[in-house]
Image (cartoon, rainbow, N blue to C red):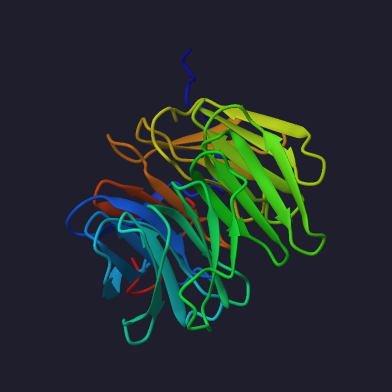
Amino acid sequence: MAFPEPKPRPPELPQKRLKTLDCGQGAVRAVRFNVDGNYCLTCGSDKTLKLWNPLRGTLLRTYSGHGYEVLDAAGSFDNSSLCSGGGDKAVVLWDVASGQVVRKFRGHAGVNTVQFNEEATVILSGSIDSSIRCWDCRSRRPEPVQTLDEARDGVSSVKVSDHEILAGSVDGRVRRYDLRMGQLFSDYVGSPITCTCFSRDGQCTLVSSLDSTLRLLDKDTGELLGEYKGHKNQEYKLDCCLSERDTHVVSCSEDGKVFFWDLVEGALALALPVGSGVVQSLAYHPTEPCLLTAMGGSVQCWREEAYEAEDGAG
């Protein structure tokens, strides 16, 4: 079934290509904004992490220390630390300023996803070994302080709020751990999950899966609030998210586009052409209509139509 590109394009959505970041050798596996959106991280098959100013297109630092491709990375709330994980089975804690490895945590099989808790005292990692492990950044202990092993297949996505862990698994279930109540809530989607995230208001969860469908769930009840289709996601682990004001659902696609749907109506608002390959990863600015997309060895920075680059940033 063909989905015609809608017209006109909503002017507030990021659709003007502002910059392209050449990330060097190999494919970019993940792109992530830092907490305030001033910087971004890329990581990938060249075994490194890179820190950028995306609006200026400038590379600030490269972090080397992994032995295999890096599949995910995240920054701490105070911008002082980074964490990463990948095919070498290591979860790495980095010092941003010095570029040095602070700790390497081992025990997983390959690591798909990493996140700091809100205080950046714990790194949470999800692995192909079906577990989530919690690593204490301040301790010298080599073992995790907690292991969550309820998943029956690989953990593809982990997100953290002040008292919750949201995890998606290849077993087709999205699990939410309420740390205050000590409870686990599980919702069955039925298709391998590639990405999960909280809405900005914390009321909903967004889940993408390999049946080329995104689902919006009520966080507390698990009720299905909306379904979003039209993109292609049948093979790869692709990112999804919500726009900065929760107005649109956003997803990568295997057909070279990024898809935007109106959250409430479910209608396709924009199919943004990025290139001819798979859009592997994306990141949405925390407060502004600014989008980062990763395809092949480069990252594209997009802004809304009316955006005018500041001097030196264009």
Name the spot of residue 221 as percent of width and height, x first.
82, 40
Report how many numbered discs are placed on residues in the image: 0
- Can the viewer see residue 63? yes
Q: Residue furthest left?
A: 25
Side of 36 relative to 274 (left or right)? right
Residue, x 37% and y 44% (percent of image)? 280
Task: From the viewer's side, name the closer residue of 243 and 163.
Answer: 163
**In the rendered image, the vertical position of residue 209 relative to residue 15, given as above or below:** above
* Quadrant (top left/top right/bottom left/bottom right) for the C terminus: bottom left
Percent across and percent down for residue 126 are 50, 54
Image location of residue 308, percent across then percent down:
43, 62
Residue at 49 percent across and 70 percent down: it is: 143
* Residue at image point 47% right, 26% down: 5
Q: Quadrant of residue 136?
A: bottom right
Q: Closer to the camera, 149 or 190? A: 149
Which one is nearer the viewer's eye here, 66 or 239? Answer: 66
Which residue reaches farthest top? 1
**Quarter residue 57 falls in:** bottom left
> Image check: 292 left or right of 263?
left
Residue 266 seen? no
Name which quarter of the figure residue 208 lies in.
top right
- Residue 176 in picture, x, y percent from top left: 70, 50
Q: Nearer the viewer, residue 161 or 264?
A: 161
Horizontal placement of 157 versus 293: left or right? right
| Residue lying at 48% horizontally and 60% vertically, measured from the top left | 114
